[in-house]
Amino acid sequence: MKNYIVYFILLLTLVLTGACNNEWVEEVYVQNVGLKAPVNSKGVTDVYLRYQANGEVTYRLPVIVGGSTMNERDLDVAIDVDPDTLIGLNEARWKQREDLYFQLLDKKHYEFASPTCHIPAGECQGLFDIKFKFSGLDLVDKWVLPLTILDSDSYDPNPRKNYRKALLRVMPFNDYSGAYGATNMFVYMMDNTSAMVSSTRTLHVVSENQCFFYAGVISEELKDRDKYKIVLTFNENGTLTAEPADPTNAMNFRLIGDAPTYTTSMSLDEVTPYLEHHFTTIYMSYTYDDVTTYEDKDIVVPCRAEGSMLMERKVNSLIPDTDQAIQW
C-alpha cells in the first residue's frame, strides 16, 4: 500500500513540474510591446513639462519590449491617437458631468516626430518623441492625449490595456504654478465679518511668467468656473499684474489698495541636504462678484478677498531634469 502512495506522489510531482516548465517556456519566448505610462488614481498619467519661452517642449514616451529574453529583431512600433479609450474613461468616471470630462488634446497642440518608434535589435526600449505646443492651451479644462499601439504582424502588443495604451494628461508648469496653501486668504461675503477660506488655490500655467487661479473660494469643479479666472503676471520687480481673463469682467474683479506682490525664497532640508525647499508667497487684496450661485442672473453676491497664499516646491538637486527633480 505504501508503494502505491509513493508512486502516486512521484506521478503528481512529474505532472506539476511539467506544467510549470511549459508555462516557463512560453514566458521566455513570448515578447510583448507596451507603453510605459503608469496610471494614477484618476486613470491617467500626469506628464509634467516645463513651459518654454516658445511654448513648445518635447516629451519622450518610453516604449518597452517585455519578456524574459532580449529583443533580437529591429522593431518599428506604430502608435496613434485613441479617442475611444478616453471616451470610455470619461463616461465611467464622470457620468453626466460632461464639464468635468478629460478633453481630447487638439492636433494643433501636439506633433509626432514619427508615426513609429524604432527599437533596434539588442535593445528592449525605445523612445517615442511627442512635441507639445502649449501656447494658447486653456487649462480650465483637463487635456489628455490618448495613445495606443497599433496592430502589426511584426510585433505583439501587450494584451493588457494599461500597457498597450497611454492616457497622457499634459501638465505644463512654470516657476510659479502649483497648489498654494490658501488658509491665510480670507474671503468675506458682502459685509459679513466671518471669513471663508479654501485649503488650497491652484495656479495654472498661462505662459512662461503667467498663471491663473479662480477667485475667492470658487470650486475648480464649478460649471461656470471660467468666469472667475484671475490671470497673474509675475514681474521681475516682485509685483504682480492681476486682471480678469474674461474680457467682459462679468465677476467685476477689482484690486484693493496697492498692487499685489510676491516673494520667493529657498532653504536646504535639515535632514537631506540635497533636497531644496522653494517657497513662493503671494500677497493680494481684491473684490469680485459671485454671479452664478443664484439662478436669477440679477442677483449677485459681492465678495472681498485679502491675505496671502503660499506654495512650497521640493526639488532634488541631484537630479538634472527639472520635471523629474520636483517632488510632485
Image: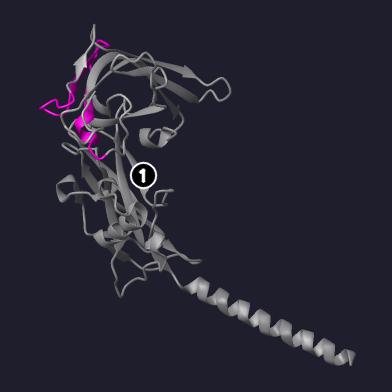
Relative depth, front residue between 243 and 303? 303
Q: Give the magenta-colored segment's residue range.
A: 223-251
Screen quadrant of the N terminus: bottom right
Q: In this rendering, is residue 222 above or below 268?
A: below
Q: Residue furthest top?
A: 258
- The reply to whether residue 207 is visible in this rendering is no
| Location of residue 129 in the rendering, given as x and y in whole percent from the top left corner | 27, 50
Relative depth, front residue between 26 and 212? 212
Left or right of 104? Residue 308 is right
Q: In this rendering, is residue 7 above or below 182?
A: below
Q: Is residue 156 magenta?
A: no
- The reply to whether residue 215 is visible in this rendering is yes
Relative depth, front residue between 126 and 101? 101
| Location of residue 153 in the rendering, given as x and y in whole percent from the top left corner | 30, 75
Q: Quadrant of residue 225?
A: top left
Q: Quadrant of residue 173?
A: top left
Q: Is residue 236 magenta?
A: yes
Relative depth, front residue between 124 and 47? 47
Name which residue type carries label 1: Asp
Screen quadrant of the C terminus: top left
Left or right of 12? Residue 144 is left
Which residue position is annotated with label 1? 46
| Location of residue 127 in the rendering, given as x and y in whole percent from the top left corner | 33, 53
Left or right of 43? Residue 18 is right
Mark 1: which secondary structure?
Answer: strand
Give the residue displayed 28% in from the left and 55% down from the top: 146
The 10 Å Cα crowd at callout 1, few under 14, some 14 to 19, many 20 or more, is some
Q: In this rendering, is residue 162 above or below 8?
A: above
Q: In this rendering, is residue 232 above or below 156?
A: above
Left or right of 62? Residue 244 is left
